Image (cartoon, rainbow, N blue to C red):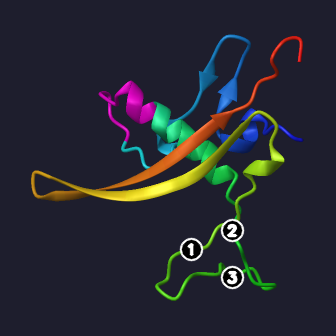
Amino acid sequence: MNDLAFDQIFPNGSQTVDTWTIAKADLPGLIASNSNSPGSLFTAICLAYWYQNQPDITTDSGEIITTISGEQIFCDAMDLFADINSTYWRLLLKNVNSQVYKYDQLVFFYYATIAGS
């Protein structure tokens, strides 16, 4: 099994022994502001990881294959990675102050070896 390297998920980011540097603009679904919540940043980081593990399905000529309604089809490659797995659970639409928000719900699984087993 493989582990994704930091730069595979965040190609414009950098890391040192002590820090990660990721531009908010590189995080999917995040509108960068000086008041982004920890929850929105965590979610965007999880989405970046999830999207990186959902490769496009394309034709031989490189065109992205879509459903009849035009939605892109992804291939789930999460089983290829050692420590973490995720799956798409469901889509929720929520109306807040007359604005509809789309909530993609993902479930993440983390695998660890138990000492002595």
- One can see residue 11 in this view: no
**Above or below 73: residue 91:** above
Task: Locate residue 48, reporting x and y percent.
Answer: 58, 45
Residue 64 in the image: x percent, y percent?
Answer: 65, 78
- Residue on which disc 1 sits: 72
CA–CA distance in space, label 2 to label 3: 9 Å
Q: Which quadrant of the rendered structure holds the N terminus?
A: top right
Q: Tell me residue 107's x, y (percent).
A: 55, 44
Q: Which residue is mark 2?
A: 56
Q: Residue at x 49, y 83 (%)?
A: 70
Amino acid carrying mark 1 in the image: Gln
Disc 2 crowd, CA 10 A, few/some/many (<14, 14-19, 20+) = some
Q: Nearer the viewer, mark 1 or mark 3?
A: 1
SS for dot 3: loop
Instruction: Indicate whether residue 39 is drawn in magenta.
Output: yes
Residue located farthest toward the left when viewing the structure as drawn: 97
- Foreground mark, 2 or 3, reads 2
> Is 60 one of the magenta-colored residues?
no
Q: Main secondary structure of the magenta part?
A: loop
Distance from disc 1 to disc 2, alpha carbons, whole Å, reads: 8 Å
Residue 22 quadrant: top right
Q: Nearer the viewer, residue 61 or 115?
A: 115
Q: Give the structural element (helix, strand or loop) at label 2.
A: loop
Residue 63: mark in rendering: 3
In the displayed structure image, the side of residue 11 where residue 96 appears, left or right: left
State whether residue 96 appears in this view: yes
The amino acid type found where label 3 is placed reads Glu
- For the magenta stretch, what is the residue range? 32-41
Identify the mark nearer the N-term, 1 or 2: 2
